[in-house]
Image (cartoon, grey):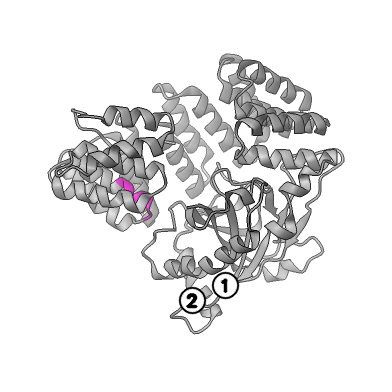
């Protein structure tokens, strides 16, 4: 959860109750840590470290705008502290306010801060502004300085792949980090995802299989190898790897999730559902376990499927109203497309996402100062609230989280080109997920294959008998589709010489 670029840098002395708050944060107990840090920053003259830890605690609770106020206070009260400026730049970057983040991080550097995390903040901000060459250079400077992190390494490899499709150069970044002592398991998984994104799934599987032999105790590598084997059709081998993982950590939700997938793949939906229920008893809001429980229930004919995937109740289709300041919705969508076009400079899809033959924006959109993007989030507020009201309360995993308010967790844009599609997937961090259509491939939409349509209900697994999509929604410019984040969804590929541009976001209960 804690990114090397956004974790607050620390002063040499940590006074008072700060170590206790940091210990609570490391345990995932941010709400308890907040009780301590709130008291510390309420003092007449809070220390620099109190302000930094309080801001980071707020960020852990996804209260970024509140965190920003305390980072700003730190730069006022401790204006000569490079750490204060680093932390301010990191939060501004997390909010998507990269134009303000760049001068803040340069101020930290001018005050003498020359560490890897500060260069990482700088690299991310440059990337978000579209300064690609400068961003690559900043990422390389990041990797020259300790600590060497997986995040910065994988991001640089991803940028190289997306910009130029240069597999050799992207691999070289990962291999160099491995030789420099980077974490072997995560680096292997990143390299396997790179192979998969390039279409070489056999190489991905071979790499993970070799990694299991060399690192038999690495649970994450074991789970990745199990999934890779299943996707290639080696279902018995995938199941055996998942069972090995269960013998190592049978109460881990991620392990039970993989075992449920393996049971479903080998044609045992009842066993898959039983395993998924075991996992949900431990982690009732685990999005992947819910999604696989639904797939297993559907295959087994269990009524849980209709409870989790009530398409009529849970999938909402809305048309936004024309934002204030534009004469028509068409005029607004034209401006929105122009704004987003500038944010899609990439030739390839990111290697860690579901899209194929397209690009995805790499900066957060929710706090953008661009008035066109600001108008979008204002326009979708009304349908989101209407959807929440329509949902009401319930005991199922979707409706029981329905609160009186919501906030955006993250948002991004996807541009699909001819042949483009989304693999079936879910969103692990959201509650309500979305697809908003800015541009649609009109020539493809009326084909018998429903090219370019969003589909629901089909898991990313070849089953016998096959599990077909259960619901389709036709895209339309200005249309917003809302659905549970745990619901499997993907896109039918389109072959016409057109584009398909969307904005997607995850909303969570406030």
Where 389 falls versus 487 (above or below)?
Answer: below
In the image, is 401 to the left or to the right of 445? Answer: left
Q: Are marks 2 and 1 in contact (CB under 8 Å)?
A: yes
Give percent across and percent down for residue 144: 31, 31
Give percent across and percent down for residue 340: 48, 64
Residue 462 visible? The answer is no
Which region shows up in magenta?
A: 90-96
Q: Nearer the viewer, residue 93 or 215?
A: 93
Chief secondary structure of the magenta portion: helix
Q: Quadrant of residue 238?
A: top right
| Residue appearing at x 19%, y 28% in the figure | 12
Count residues near mark 2 (Cα–Cα under 10 Å), then give few for <14, some for 14-19, many for 20+: many
Q: Quadrant of residue 482?
A: bottom right
Residue at which label 1 appears: 320
In the image, is 429 to the left or to the right of 112? Answer: right
Q: Nearer the viewer, residue 488 or 437?
A: 488
Where 98 falls versus 332 (above or below)?
Answer: above
Residue 319 visible? The answer is yes
Give percent across and percent down for residue 460: 71, 42
Q: Quadrant of residue 491?
A: bottom right
Taking the magenta stretch, the answer to whether it contains residue 93 is yes
| Residue appearing at x 77%, y 38% in the figure | 296
Residue at which label 2 appears: 323
Q: How many marks?
A: 2
Taking the magenta stretch, the answer to whether it contains residue 202 is no
| Residue appearing at x 78%, y 52% in the figure | 469
| Residue appearing at x 42%, y 67% in the figure | 374
Give percent across and percent down for residue 119: 29, 40
Where 142 falls versus 123 (above or below)?
Answer: above
Measure the alpha-carbon separation of dots 2 and 1: 8 Å
């Amino acid at each position: 959860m804690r990114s090397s670029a956004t974790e607050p840098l620390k002063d040499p002395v940590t006074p008072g109750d700060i170590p206790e708050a940091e210990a609570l944060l490391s345990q995932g107990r941010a709400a308890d840590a907040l009780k301590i840090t709130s008291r510390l920053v309420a003092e007449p003259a809070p220390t620099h470290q109190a302000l930094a830890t309080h801001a980071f605690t707020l960020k852990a609770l996804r209260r970024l705008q509140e965190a920003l106020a305390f980072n700003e206070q730190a730069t006022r009260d401790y204006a000569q502290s490079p750490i204060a400026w680093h932390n301010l730049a990191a939060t501004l970057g997390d909010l998507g306010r990269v134009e303000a983040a760049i001068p803040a991080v340069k101020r930290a550097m001018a005050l003498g801060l020359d560490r890897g995390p500060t260069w990482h903040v700088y690299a991310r901000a440059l990337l978000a502004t579209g300064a690609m060459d400068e961003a690559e250079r900043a990422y390389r400077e990041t990797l020259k300085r300790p600590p060497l992190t997986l995040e910065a390494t994988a991001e640089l490899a991803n940028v190289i792949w997306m910009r130029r499709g240069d597999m050799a150069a992207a691999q070289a970044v990962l291999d160099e980090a491995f030789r420099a002592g980077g974490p072997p398991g995560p680096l292997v998984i990143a390299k396997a995802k790179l192979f998969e994104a390039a279409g070489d799934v056999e190489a991905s599987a071979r790499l993970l299989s070799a990694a299991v032999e060399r690192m038999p105790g690495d649970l994450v590598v074991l789970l990745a190898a199990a999934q890779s084997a299943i996707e290639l059709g080696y279902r018995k081998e995938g199941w055996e790897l998942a069972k090995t993982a269960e013998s190592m950590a049978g109460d881990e939700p991620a392990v039970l999730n993989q075992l449920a997938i393996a049971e479903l793949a080998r044609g045992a939906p009842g066993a898959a559902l039983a395993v998924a229920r075991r996992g949900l008893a431990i982690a009732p809001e685990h999005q992947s376990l819910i999604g696989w429980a639904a797939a297993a229930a559907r295959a087994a004919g269990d009524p849980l499927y209709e409870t989790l995937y009530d398409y009529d109740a849970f999938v909402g289709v809305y048309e936004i109203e024309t934002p204030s300041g534009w004469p028509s919705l068409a005029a607004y969508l034209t401006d929105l497309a122009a704004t987003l076009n500038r944010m899609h400079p990439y030739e390839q899809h990111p290697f860690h996402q579901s899209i194929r033959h397209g690009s995805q924006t790499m900066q957060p959109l929710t706090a953008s100062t661009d008035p066109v993007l600001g108008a979008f989030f204002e326009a979708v507020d009304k349908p989101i609230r209407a959807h929440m009201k329509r949902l009401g309360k319930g005991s199922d995993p979707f409706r029981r989280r329905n609160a009186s308010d919501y906030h955006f967790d993250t948002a991004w844009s996807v541009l699909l080109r001819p042949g483009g599609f989304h693999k079936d997937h879910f969103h692990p961090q959201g509650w309500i997920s979305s697809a908003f259509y800015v541009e649609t491939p009109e020539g493809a939409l009326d084909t018998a294959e429903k090219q370019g349509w969003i589909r629901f209900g089909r898991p990313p697994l070849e089953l016998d008998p096959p599990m077909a999509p259960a619901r389709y929604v036709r895209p339309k410019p200005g249309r917003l589709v809302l659905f549970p984040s745990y619901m499997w969804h993907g896109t039918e590929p389109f072959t016409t010489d057109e584009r398909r541009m969307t904005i997607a976001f995850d909303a969570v209960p406030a």
